[in-house]
Amino acid sequence: MGQSASSGSRDLDSSRYFSSEREMIRFYNTFAVKQLTAPELVSFKGNIGGKALDDAVTCPTMLNLLRISTKNEILANLLFNCFRTLSNFPLIKDSYDDITYIGLLKSCLLLHRQRCLKYVGNKAYNQVKLIFVSLAMNKSVKEVPSSPNPATALDSKKIIKDFDNVDVEDLGVPAESMLQLLTLLLRISKSCATSNCKFESDVDTNWDSFKPYALNLLRTMNSEITNSQDAARHVITFDQFENTVTTVSPNLLNILECLMEHLLFLDRDLVEPQATMPATISSKLVNDPFLAQLATILPKELVYSKMQKLYVGRESGFSMRSFQSKAFKWMAPSILIISGMRIVNDTEYAMDKNPRYGKFLEEYPRLKDNDQQLIASHTGKRKFTFAVYIDEPWKVTNKEMFGNLKTTIVQLSPTQELFKAVRPENVYFNTVGGGIGIGCKQPVVKSSSKKYVPGNVSLTIDASLEFGVFRHVGHGGTINPGELLAKQREDNITFEHRFLIQDVEVWGCGGQKELEEQIKNWEWEEAEAKRRQRINLQSLNEDRALLELAGLVGQSQSGGSV
């Protein structure tokens, strides 16, 4: 039959064979408890009101434990179904038991990157795949189990490695459900700078202001989706989900981690987000939803540090001189934000609406229409937004260039993409009529003519800050092709977005010293929360059985069943 796993004292590596599914789940329930510290366990028990760990959990109870309140049934059902799948780990396909409190605790471990890898005992485990499966599996419809014959020993390591024989190619998350989840994650992002920040209880508040930014992420996953109405007709596949969260939204699932970590803190150990995060002055472009989306791709320490408004075109005027007077005194990194509406028909727009655009097209060697390889969500009249991280202070460069290897172009709408510098000297600020360029060569400016020289991957802004062009024709320039495109092996496709600029802003970011200080502040706050947990551990005796179960107190380390 193989080795029995009934003893919680045995190492996970030596306890992989089980005589029944029930025995396997009992083992992983007990093993989940052993992953937590005594204060975390006591806090969790306090949050569940002393209920037994194997008691069933309803959807309202689940939301209450997560400290979020919503009337969004699609979101609530998605989360409930996700936790029900994880609650039955490692039998994520074949077991259909209800969510229990111990199952919710397992979900907390499995949705946390580092805890998950330790819990499953495999550093190469694809946690992103597990999360997708948990979102896509429909546990409300019970299927015929595909488990082995009961007479055969069950190898949990193989079951975990094979995701209980789930075929992700057959799964998909309804795009509308994914949109609700993405909106939630952006909505609570600012409260997830640390794992012990309080949430605003009613997440439905200001929900609609976050939804358009979540839609940018949804379109990134499935480029056939052009608007929120399209979501009802599409699904998100595993490849689409994994490609997006591992390349252009690497911090997205961190928000989910923090949401689950709140299960391990009592209310008294939570702090207001304002206590750990400086206030940010808002503008037309920069607001909480914008920062939340930006924080999915840039480090949260950078985005949620004290950003300083340097230049806003709507306030100071759209001119290179105004830009220079406002932004050039900042001696630390900054973020340039450009937003505008894509010009659909060059000839019609130049002739009927804006003759200046016709002059710009004479100076800019535009990509031929036959060379345009546009995805559905990039066609038509679309708003494009780019954020450019500039690691060096701005300077006038009419001949030479500046910018180091940290220069990064982030496309934020209508889809999200990341373009990193591959060579230094990649930015110019030309005050003799050349405008601003990232990834370009210096324009050729003469008394009677001007020619822009766009790079293979480049952002060109004319001297009047009126027109912008983003070009992508593959490798060979100072900026690399898109990270997501490279993941999809489409990094050599050619396209160009020419747009009428509506907003230009520059925001100063803290330098290395400021960012390190911000990180230290957040780390201190989390450590302080852990310290308070230990100090508040007054109910040790009454929780002794739970702690003994985890092998954290007492002489007996044999564990037990849950």
Image: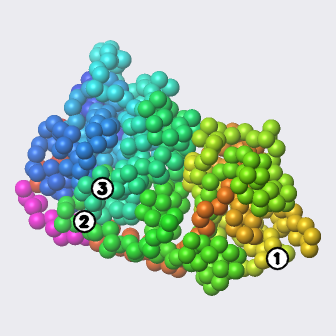
The amino acid type found where label 3 is placed reads Thr
Write down the quadrant of residue 94 in the picture. Answer: top left
Magenta range is 531-542
User: What percent of the width, then of the height, locates residue 501?
Assistant: 65, 61
Q: Which residue is mark 2?
A: 270
Q: Mark 3, residues whose alpha carbon is within 10 Å: few (<14), some, or many (≥20)?
A: few
Q: Which residue is mark 1?
A: 432
Could you tell me how many numbered marks the image carries?
A: 3
User: What percent of the width, then of the height, locates residue 426?
Assistant: 75, 66
Q: Say what secondary structure mark 2 lies in.
A: loop
Is 264 above or below relative to 76?
below
Horizontally, is 198 left or right of 443 in the view? Answer: left
Q: Mark 1, residues whose alpha carbon is within 10 Å: few (<14), some, or many (≥20)?
A: some
Q: Say what secondary structure mark 3 lies in.
A: loop
Is 409 above or below relative to 347?
below
The amino acid type found where label 2 is placed reads Leu
